[in-house]
Amino acid sequence: MVEYLQTLLLYLGFYEGKIDGIFGNSTKRAVINFQNAFGLQPDGIVGNNTWNSLMPYINGGLGFIVPTNINYSYSILQININSLKTLYPFLEISSSGKSVLGNDIPVIKIGRGEKEVFYSASIHAK
């Protein structure tokens, strides 16, 4: 999740470090700078208010929805699916079952034509 945060902050111009998934001093400084710029309590903690301020950018405001330069987890997959649903409310999201780790395997239905195309991908990360 830290890689995802770093990617967002990098694209917004607040982070200059390497996307490494480590919440170190440079990431904390970037979070504080973001919080200052958006009128939030500059504590360096990514709580609800900070995530809510990042949400427009998570939902496609940076020109991408699914960053491809980070490692993926189930929680990032869920963020990406929610972002897609926000931008494209006609999408129908469901589950085709459970992964071996007990996570839902998402299905995204795009159209309503008589022919169907099924794309499936599952992620077994925690």
Image: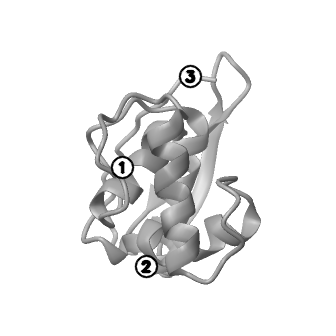
* Colour scheme in use: one colour
Q: Identify the image quadrant of the N terminus.
A: top right
Q: Is residue 19 above or below residue 51?
A: above
Q: Amino acid at mark 1?
A: Thr
Please state which of residues 33 and 52 is positioned toward the viewer in this rendering: 33
Among the two numbered marks 3 and 2 on one chain, the one whose residue lies closer to the N terminus: 2
Q: Which residue is mark 1?
A: 7
Q: Which residue is mark 3?
A: 125
Helix, strand or loop status at disc 3:
loop
Q: CA distance from mark 3 to mark 2?
A: 25 Å
How many marks overall? 3
Residue 102 sits in which quadrant? top right
Residue 101 sits in which quadrant? top right
Residue 39 image position (x, y, % from top left): 62, 83
Helix, strand or loop status at disc 2:
helix
Q: Identify the image quadrant of the C terminus.
A: top right
Q: Residue at x 65, y 16 (%)?
A: 100
Q: CA distance from mark 1 to mark 2?
A: 20 Å
Q: Amino acid at mark 3?
A: Ala
Query: Which circle marks residue 87 in the picture?
Result: 2
Residue 35 image position (x, y, % from top left): 58, 70
Among the two numbered marks 1 and 2 on one chain, the one whose residue lies closer to the N terminus: 1
Please state which of residues 68 and 100 is positioned toward the viewer in this rendering: 68
Q: Is residue 119 above or below residue 61?
A: above
